[in-house]
């Protein structure tokens, strides 16, 4: 039963959820993308290495850029940003009233999303190497919660080793793979406003080094409330 509940939760996550405030609708595309790519709830981690080969460069080498995007999908600002990007992409302001209502209804499904028990981390990957891109995409699609239990963890000051309760391969390219962690262990919150750092780590087969994204907990506090 719990697994089916989590599945339903993740399906809803695919639709951006919004808090009651509609201030996100004033964001420009650049502002929304900044929240998605480099904010208190999102990190870009890029790893580079040089490979040799004819025609790869002046000296026969080529620099490969592998970038992971790590986002806390359970945090409202991330879902707001997804919603705003969607609005701008479809030209929401130019739609007639009927079409705008339809889009608003779709977005509102996520508004009612209850993440009070879960912390959800979404990971996407981009590379300028088609082979590397394909390998990592295949990795995400082939993994299960059982195979990932020793490859991924979330760390807080009080809980240095939090393993995911559920994993969902990418269904939407922009959202990516989704890892679901508990908000409480034995009724104790895994993260509080007193913590300093939150770290997400992932060991992707064939990738060196392991992905490690560090977040400042204090930067996630808005108006005295920890948003995660």
Image: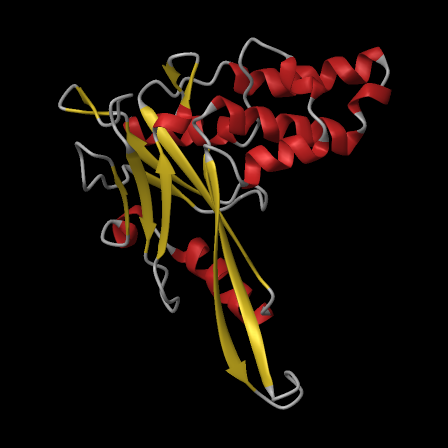
Residue 112 percent across, percent down from the top left: 49, 14
Q: Residue 227, image x and y in percent?
A: 40, 21
- State the residue at coordinates (52%, 81%): 51
Q: Quadrant of the N terminus?
A: top left
- State the quadrant of the C terminus: top left
Where residue 166 appears, x then y in whole percent? 32, 38
Q: Residue furthest top?
A: 20
Q: Is residue 105 left or right of residue 161?
A: right
Residue 32 location, x and y as percent?
64, 31
182 displayed left or right of 13? left
Name which residue lies at 62% across and 20% down.
107
User: Of 216 and 91, which appears nearest the observer?
Assistant: 216
Quarter of image, res 119? top left
Q: Residue at x 18, y 40 (%)?
A: 160
Q: How many marks?
A: 0
Residue 92, compared with residue 52, is above or below; it is: above
Q: Which is nearer the eye, 109 or 212?
A: 212
Outermost residue toward the left in this view: 186
Q: Quadrant of residue 106?
A: top right
9 or 223, which is in the foreground?
A: 223
Colouring rule applied to residues = secondary structure
């Amino acid at each position: 039963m719990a697994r089916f509940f989590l599945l339903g939760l993740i399906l809803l996550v695919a639709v951006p959820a919004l808090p009651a405030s509609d201030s996100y609708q004033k964001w420009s595309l650049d502002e929304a993308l900044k929240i998605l790519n480099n904010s208190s709830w999102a990190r870009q981690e890029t790893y580079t290495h040089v490979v040799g080969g004819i025609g790869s460069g002046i000296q026969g080498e080529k620099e490969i850029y592998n970038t992971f995007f790590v986002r806390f999908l359970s945090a409202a600002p991330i879902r707001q940003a997804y919603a705003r990007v969607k609005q701008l992409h479809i030209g929401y302001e130019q739609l007639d009233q009927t079409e705008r209502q339809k889009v608003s209804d779709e977005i509102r499904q996520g508004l009612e999303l209850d993440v009070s028990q879960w912390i959800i981390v979404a990971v996407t990957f981009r590379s300028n190497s088609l082979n590397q891109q394909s390998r990592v995409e295949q990795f995400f699609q082939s993994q299960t919660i059982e195979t990932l239990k020793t490859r991924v963890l979330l760390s807080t000051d009080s809980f240095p080793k939090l393993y995911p309760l559920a994993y969902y391969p990418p269904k939407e390219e922009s959202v990516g793979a989704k890892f679901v962690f508990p908000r409480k262990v034995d009724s104790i919150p895994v993260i509080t406003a007193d913590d300093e750092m939150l770290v997400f780590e992932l060991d992707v087969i064939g990738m060196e080094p392991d992905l490690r994204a560090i977040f400042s907990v204090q930067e996630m506090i808005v108006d005295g409330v920890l948003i995660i």
